[in-house]
Image: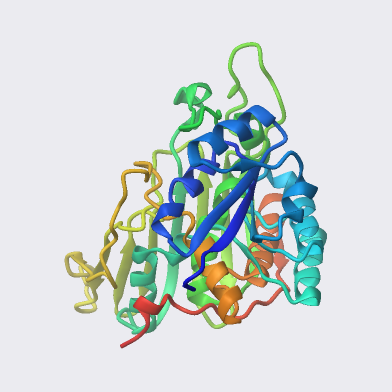
Amino acid sequence: MPARPVYVAVVGCGFVSDFYLDGLADHPGLALAGVHDLLPERAARVARRHGVRVYEDLPRLLADERVSVVLNLTPPKAHAGVTLAALAAGRHVYSEKPLATTLADGREIVEEAERRGLLVACAPSNVLGEAFQTLWREVRAHVVATPRLVYAELDDGAVHRMGYERWRNATGSPWPYREEFAAGCNVEHSSYHLATLTTLFGPVRRVVADRATLVRDKFPPGEEGPLGPDFVTATLTFDGGPLARLTCSTIAPVDRSLTVVGDGGVLRMADCWDHGTPVTLREAAGRRSAYLGPPRPVEPVRPFAPRSHHASGHRMDFPRGVADLAEAATLGRPPRLSARHALHVLEVTLAMGSADGAVDIASEFPPPEPMPWARDS
């Protein structure tokens, strides 16, 4: 990173903001310029915690000449508007997932950024974590020979039974259950595995999906609202690659694993929300029914050093993607979490959430680069 820090301004001080802002100290190349939220009292709490200013509105934030990167942590329906406003003001943008809520808005963001020579990157950043970078190294090294089948699980437990209405972050913001339930598990969670799968195997070419809303009494007593799916499953076809099954729910017991089955064995990453989760290998030992040997740990590309601010269920360095974007802007290279990659993930997500039958996927994206400390030796 450059000697002088890159200044970041945050739009949106809700529940997820602590995951990002508490980790900024781990990235000395980044500095927080200030924050803005539609709820002034919420912005004030976050600003006090981090010792920065509150911008009264978005135009004032965008007028601050120190700001190079806008960190867009607004609800999904606001992502496109905030990102486009930041681009119009000449700022790079790192957006929480999804890039937008419609494919048209996502395309407009990509085209506007490219027209202006600006960078947009998008969460999730779990692909930059030590565990996934280890798995990716093993796939590139053909330790399981040709991958044939992938199982990607993102079951987050029975959320409606967890007392979610009492969840608060360190600055007092509640978990936005109305927005989460309305969007559904597909929009909220599928991208954690779509980002990893497409990094491993390139663009998805066909989606066959099904979905359902299995629990309709999720809200606290006396409340009701729109409900998106709490279960989705999809079969994903890649060009010349394996077949993948992605299952996502807020019903089944927690399972966030990623399993790659190849001719030479099976690789498994235990938890896509944990940068330090174990990666194991079971090597193929013959042609009989018990052809797989016992699982053995894979040496990580480097150890993951958890911090006290990492939540137990989200041991991820959330601002790592912001730091990569800032470095990319400084060095003139593409960010590893590129806008075109995010647009592809969005297209697949929308196909999983609304289409029936087989859906062809058209978008492309440049292949991302491994982290410098995870490159092939």
Q: Nearer the viewer, residue 230 or 339?
A: 339
Report x, y in % for residue 332.
Answer: 61, 81
Report x, y in % for residue 32.
Answer: 55, 52
Report x, y in % for residue 220.
Answer: 58, 17
Q: Nearer the viewer, residue 202 or 165?
A: 165
Rendered image quadrant of residue 42? top right
Quadrant, the C terminus: bottom left
Counting the numbered discs, the total is 0
**Residue at x 62%, y 80% (from the top left corner):** 366
Q: Is residue 16 left or right of residue 37?
A: left
**Residue at x 30%, y 52% (from the top left corner):** 306
Q: Is residue 321 visible?
A: no
**Which residue is the extreme one toward the top?**
222
Rendered image quadrant of residue 254? top left
Question: What colouring method underlies this structural image?
Answer: rainbow
The answer to whether residue 134 is above or below residue 154 is below
The answer to whether residue 179 is above or below residue 22 is above
Rendered image quadrant of residue 330? bottom right
**Residue at x 30%, y 56% (from the top left corner):** 277
Q: Nearer the viewer, residue 360 or 325?
A: 325
Q: Is residue 330 visible?
A: yes
Report x, y in % for residue 134.
Answer: 33, 71
Q: Is residue 20 left or right of residue 218?
A: left
**Residue at x 58%, y 24% (from the top left corner):** 218
